[in-house]
Image (cartoon, grey):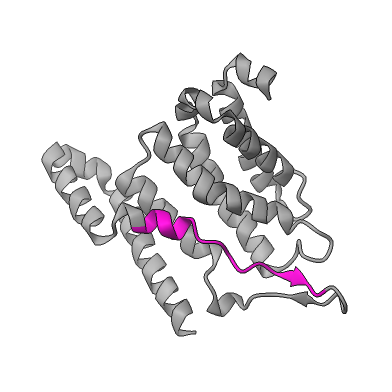
Amino acid sequence: MQIKNIWSDCSNFLLLLGINFETHLSTLIMQGKSESLRIRSILRSLVPLEDLVGVISLQFDLPRVEPITETVIQPMMNSCFAPEHKAAMLLFLDRVYGIEDVDFLLKILEDGFLNDIRAAAQLDTQQLHGTDMALALNRYVCSSILPIITKHAHLLAEAEHRDQLIDSALHAIYRLSQGRAMTKAQKDFISECLCAIASVIKAGFWISA
């Protein structure tokens, strides 16, 4: 429980900072560029970018089916590292640090996003799709990861050298749309993300894929 409390306290703190920074950003800009940069610098000093990327790249303890008894074994959501913790880290990263170049976007896509998207799809089975972790992963992927990819999809126009990674991401995201527990709103996020990626991919990609 203590580990859970640490993750929750940390994620809630970063969530609050990220939301407040975005909320007051326009006011800070009106007060002068130097003031907004100063506040951003202070926030960045609290949590190094490498630490945020490290947390976003962590893997979750996923539920599984015990092969002999077919009993569903689930992690205790009130005492484990959960998708909501990553969501706070990702919001802070996007609003305080920003994603400004394709190499960084590809790094977090490969090291963190793609693993979680695949994990969400992996849990889309008759026995596991309704578990707490599966539902939490769906929320995190559709409400946090996919909007980030959609927002910065224009950067992928410069990712010709990583065609295989982009292809893997497209297939994983599309597979999500078939999920049993996906809500209409979540499917809308999936569609928007797929369209955003497809709109910037050059014709040669589809031939090579």
- How many numbered circles does the render carry? 0
Q: Is residue 85 above or below residue 194?
A: below
The boundaries of the magenta stretch are 51-66
Left or right: 26 as drawn, with respect to 8: left
- Quarter of the picture holding the C terminus: top right
Magenta-drawn stretch contains 100 = no
- Residue drawn 58% across and 47% down? 114
- Image coords of residue 184 (percent x, y): 70, 46
- Residue drawn 19% across and 39% down? 29
Left or right: 31 as drawn, with respect to 77: left
Camera-side residue of 104 and 82: 104
Residue 8 found in image quarter: bottom left
- Image coords of residue 132 (percent x, y): 67, 69
Q: Residue 188: tell me if it is visible.
A: no
- Residue drawn 64% across and 75% down? 75
Q: Residue 150: tell me if it is visible.
A: yes
- Residue drawn 21% across and 43% down? 27
